[in-house]
Image (cartoon, rainbow, N blue to C red):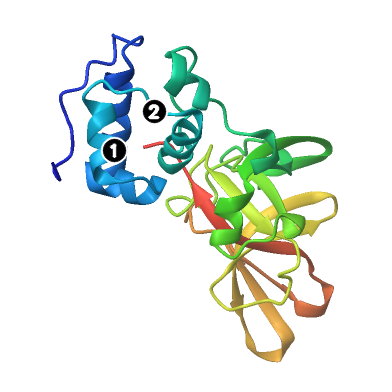
């Protein structure tokens, strides 16, 4: 029995065999689940046939399939349970006010809330939570690359200007998201991707750079 088990009935939550089949489906096959849990293939087939596993085997199965142990044993609660708090990290969030057609976006840095991110996901993508702040895109100045409402992560340690990259910049208390173009003579052009917004040239040494955009996401 090496094929995935697909005849699941999730409405019947008190049937251990069905819950065990759900684990097999998550793992991909009986063999895959047995191997990951460290139990024999024949033993797992016996449990699928109605046999009762020991407490040790239950724990191994729950850990192998990343499901909640109580759910597996009793059918109560959620299959995967809640995400453990220790797996989340809270990133400071710049809350912004949407820009209109004639003004750059203003972001209020005096009111900070937080967004939760999975620390394992951050680490897997080479991102250090201590270096990050989050931002909800407040306007359309960077459309179509960033749309209003997009979630962005700013790495506040990346302040060395790179040509073509998007940076968060402070100007007289106003925060701007702009694409950087390095010009000759120590000048920098701040470019809005949206042509409705004008680009400006400034002196490079007079620029206050708060960080670089390293990730963004939006709802489909």
Q: Is residue 149 visible?
A: yes
Query: Which image quadrant is residue 165 in?
Result: bottom right
Which quadrant of the figure contains the N terminus? top left
Judging by the rendered image, the residue that carries numbered circle 1 is 43
* Residue annotated with mark 2: 53
Q: Position of residue 181 (x, y in %)?
A: 58, 76
Image marks 1 and 2: residues in contact by CB distance under 8 Å: yes
Question: First in sequence: mark 1 or mark 2?
Answer: 1
Mark 2: which secondary structure?
loop
Residue 60 drawn at (x, y percent): 46, 39
Nearer to us in this view, 185 or 139: 139
Residue at the spot 62% in from the left edge and 43% down from the top edge? 117
- Number of other residues with Cα within 10 Å of mark 1, as a class: few under 14, some 14 to 19, many 20 or more: some
Query: As drawn, is 6 to the left or to the right of 59?
Result: left
Q: Is residue 21 visible?
A: no
Q: Position of residue 169 (x, y in %)?
A: 73, 60
Q: How packed is label 2: few (under 14 Cα within 10 Å), some, or many (20 or more)?
A: some
């Amino acid at each position: 029995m090496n094929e995935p088990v697909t005849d699941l009935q999730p409405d019947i939550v008190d049937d251990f065999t069905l819950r065990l089949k759900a684990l097999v489906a998550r793992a991909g096959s009986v063999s895959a689940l047995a191997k990951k849990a460290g139990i024999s293939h024949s033993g797992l087939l016996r449990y699928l046939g109605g046999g009762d596993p020991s407490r040790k085997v239950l724990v191994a199965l729950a850990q192998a399939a990343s499901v909640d142990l109580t759910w597996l044993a009793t059918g109560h609660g959620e299959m995967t349970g809640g995400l453990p708090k220790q797996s989340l990290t809270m990133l400071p969030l710049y809350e912004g006010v949407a820009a209109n057609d004639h003004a750059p976006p203003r972001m209020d840095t005096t009111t900070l809330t937080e967004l939760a991110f999975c620390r394992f996901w951050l680490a897997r993508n080479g991102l250090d939570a201590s270096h990050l702040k989050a931002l909800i895109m407040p306007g359309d100045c960077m459309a179509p690359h960033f749309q209003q409402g997009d979630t962005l992560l700013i790495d506040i340690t990346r302040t060395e200007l790179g040509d073509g990259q998007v940076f968060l910049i402070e100007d007289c208390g106003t925060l701007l998201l702009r694409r950087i173009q390095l010009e000759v003579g120590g000048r920098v052009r701040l470019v809005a991707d949206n042509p409705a917004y004008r680009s400006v040239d400034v002196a490079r040494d007079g620029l206050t750079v708060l960080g670089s955009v390293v990730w963004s996401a939006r709802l489909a």
